[in-house]
Image (cartoon, helix red, strand yellow):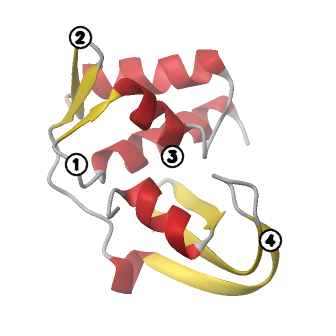
Amino acid sequence: MAEDDRVDLGLALLERLEHESLPLPAVVDRIETITTDPAVTRTILDEAELRGIIDRDDGIVRVKSRQYVRFEEQVITKEGEFSCRRCGAGLSTGHFIKLEAGELGPFGSSCIRKVTGRE
């Protein structure tokens, strides 16, 4: 995946977090489902702040958007052999988030809730 694709996907994910505010490490945990490259992670956070998607203050990230992942419409499941992008567990059913910038996943049933902020 090209850096621009990862940045777009990261921005789309941050726009849909269901928490009003999160500690920076929790936000980075979600971004790491897209990339573990620190430079790309920084670019995603900087670009999100420039575009008004988030505010950062003293290690706390405030999400300004009130768009959420609609599970019924934006989360799809696929059967197969997968590894969760968040925890690495083996999966027979992968959950994927459909965003304008692309598809993010696979995730297990509990990790999909963590990534979207439902848990």
**Among the 4 quarters of the image, the one containing residue 3:** top right
Instruction: Give the class, few, some or many, for how many residues have Cα within 10 Å of label 3's Cα (few <14, many ≥20).
Output: many
- What kind of residue is marked 2? Asp
Residue 1, how many percent across, how many down?
73, 42
| Residue in the image at 59% along x and 33% along y | 4
Question: Which structural element holds mark 4?
Answer: strand
**Separation (CA) of disc 2 from disc 3:** 25 Å
Q: Is residue 37 above or below residue 83?
A: above
**Separation (CA) of disc 1 from disc 3:** 18 Å
Question: Mark 4 vs mark 2: which is more N-terminal?
Answer: 2
Q: Where residue 58 is drawn, which disc sits there?
A: 2
Q: Where residue 19 is drawn, which disc sits there?
A: 1
What residue does disc 4 label? 82
Question: Mark 2 vs mark 1: which is more N-terminal?
Answer: 1
**Among the 4 quarters of the image, the one containing residue 14:** top left
Instruction: Give the class, few, some or many, for how many residues have Cα within 10 Å of label 1's Cα (few <14, many ≥20).
Output: some
| Residue in the image at 46% along x and 77% along y | 75
Q: Are marks 2 and 1 in contact (CB under 8 Å)?
A: no
Is residue 100 visible to the viewer in this orientation of the structure? no
Question: Mark 1 vs mark 4: which is more N-terminal?
Answer: 1
Q: Are marks 1 and 3 in contact (CB under 8 Å)?
A: no
| Residue in the image at 41% along x and 35% along y | 27
Residue 23 relative to residue 86: left or right? left
Question: Mark 1 vs mark 3: which is more N-terminal?
Answer: 3
